[in-house]
Image (cartoon, rainbow, N blue to C red):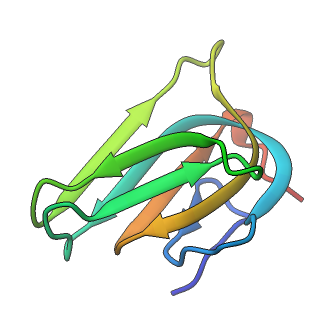
Amino acid sequence: MSNILTSNPIYVDTPQASPLLTTRIEVMKIRWVSVSAAAADRVLLQHQDGTPAWESCAVGANAIDSDAWEQNNPLVLNGLLIPTLANGAVYIYIHNRKVPA
């Protein structure tokens, strides 16, 4: 599969060195799922300027990690960059189901 940026949740399974999105997004939940993870595998989400926003590190196989934010206090990202994704997929749930155009 490949990255799907126009759905909610946004689905990313392929990291990129350039921004996936350049618009501001309000994130309600991020979930990383990897059945083939090994200890120390990582995923890193950044603002489009490279500022870190969310990171996870697997402790072993079958890694699942997630964080959620309150509706009145979402995680605000200025664009989306995922330069590191060892394996698996990241699901990014957007506030009010608004998806970037």
Q: Quadrant of residue 38?
A: bottom left
Residue 85, image x, y percentages:
43, 68
67 relative to 38 in the view: left or right:
right
Q: Find the residue positioned furthest to the front.
A: 50
Q: Position of residue 1 (x, y in %)?
A: 51, 87
Q: Residue furthest top?
A: 72
Q: Residue 95 sits in which quadrant?
A: top right
- Left or right, 66 with respect to 84, comes to left
Residue 88 left/right relative to 8: left
Residue located at (61% from left, 76% from top) = 3
Residue at image position (57%, 42%) is: 52
Q: Position of residue 91 (x, y in %)?
A: 49, 56
Q: Determine the residue positioned at 35% across, 41% down.
A: 66
| Picture mark count | 0
Residue 43 vertical placement versus 37 (above, below): above
Residue 78, compared with residue 59, is above or below; it is above
Q: Quadrant of the C terminus?
A: bottom right
The spot of residue 69 in percent (x, y) is: 51, 24
